[in-house]
Amino acid sequence: MKKLYVSIVLLIFGNCLAQEHEVYQNIELKNQDKTEITYLIKDYINGKVTADKVFAKFDIETYKSIDVYKEALSLGGSLYQITSDINILSIKREGSNYFVSTMFYWTNKQNDENKNTITVLAIIDFWVLKVDNQWKISNYINYQTKNWSSIQIGNFLYFYHPNHPFDVLKAENANIFYNKFCDFFTIPKSKLIRYYIANNCNDISQLFGYKYFISDSVNDGLCAFYDEENELIATSTSYGEMHLHEIIHAMNVHFPQAHYLLKTGLSCYINDASSRNQENIFHFNKFENYIKTNNLNFEKFEEFENIDEITSFQYVTGPLICNAIYRKGGKKLLLEYLNNTKTSDELKKKLIKDFKIKSFKEFFINEVKYYKAQGKSLLYI
């Protein structure tokens, strides 16, 4: 899953305050359509009208959240909850419909008012349709995929770009894995998971109308994510029809009391799905080298950020914790953790008790040794 750097998450949600978004254009509009569309976007983003009143019928019937813009790119919360102003950069017509290019940003307050700067959160294109003489917002993903191919195989409804060499066998194996996975954890199977295969990471962002997002500068191009609200996977050709890491994330919604490191950890650990197109051992080796020259406070390991653009600490600490749990108590102990460790304090207390931990640093170093001796994950489905 494409994850935001912790510092970026703090930057974004440090700006979460209940206030109205200022929505404006730089040039006064003298076009009735564009004026009406501007007010539509402004009223919706500021919560004056609900999604079921302003989105097209297809979106209401297809997506649980109706609005996919606000859930996209693993943001971890609604886009509209973030304190930001919205500059409408352009409203361009295509047939009877319009694309509304919007820039979400906030002003960085400084002591010298003449030196204020802005931070751009995102640039997003909203697709606005004319339906029965009314303007309706529709998710950009519907427009972007209108010329894509689609096929349903088992629980997955695949959508893939024109140049993708679709592999039916991989799709069938993905469905087999998903069903075995759900049976193993005794969780209900989704009736339908929408699975989108874009060309690359940049195309995944564009799939949802994002021309720019703040994490772009720290992302190396290998990304994907699972939208649990809408049961939707977005990945790229490099991962294809069987992106195990994201399929495993389908369990997240069924374990609301599980710490995020367990959820991320299992998405790397089960079947050695790993992350970022690298084996788990690749990330573990980076971890070992990194801690030799960096002094970290392991009592706050859940706050660790990233080793580099490829390796996030959660891709190390998460699967190592899962390895320790499964090695000690198998499925039974793993379920105990998934159902009782929502907070970091709860996770740490249980780890300390179950593994008699005196130093979390030593715990993780030793767990790397255990994993290397095993040669692979202990949990294959």
Image (cartoon, rainbow, N blue to C red):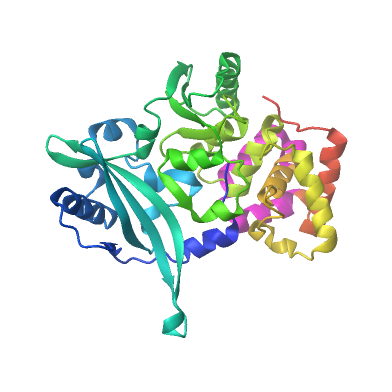
Out of 169 and 296, give the one closest to the viewer: 169
**Left or right, 184 with reference to 17:** right
Callout count: 0
Q: Is residue 66 in view from this perspective?
A: yes
Q: Which residue does the image show at 19% across and 58% down from the upper left?
A: 29
- Specify the quadrant that holds the N terminus: top right
Residue 335: in magenta span? yes
Question: Could you say where residue 369 lies in the image, as x and y percent from the top left?
Answer: 86, 44
Out of 108 and 154, give the one closest to the viewer: 108
Q: Main secondary structure of the magenta part?
A: helix
Question: Could you say where residue 297 lies in the image, as x and y percent from the top left?
Answer: 74, 65
**Left or right, 263 with reference to 364:** left
Q: Is residue 78 in view from this perspective?
A: no
Question: Could you say where residue 121 lies in the image, as x and y percent from the top left?
Answer: 45, 58
Question: Could you say where residue 120 lies in the image, as x and y percent from the top left?
Answer: 45, 61
Q: Which residue does the image show at 20% across and 43% down from the upper left?
A: 53
Q: Which residue does the image show at 72% across and 55% down from the upper left?
A: 307
Out of 129 and 266, give the one closest to the viewer: 129
- In this picture, is 75 found above or below 208? below
Q: Which residue does the image show at 55% across and 26% down from the upper left?
A: 182
Residue 153: in magenta span? no
**Left or right, 354 with reference to 239:** right
Write down the region rendered in magenta. 325-354
Out of 335 and 87, give the one closest to the viewer: 87
- In this picture, is 156 found above or below 79? above
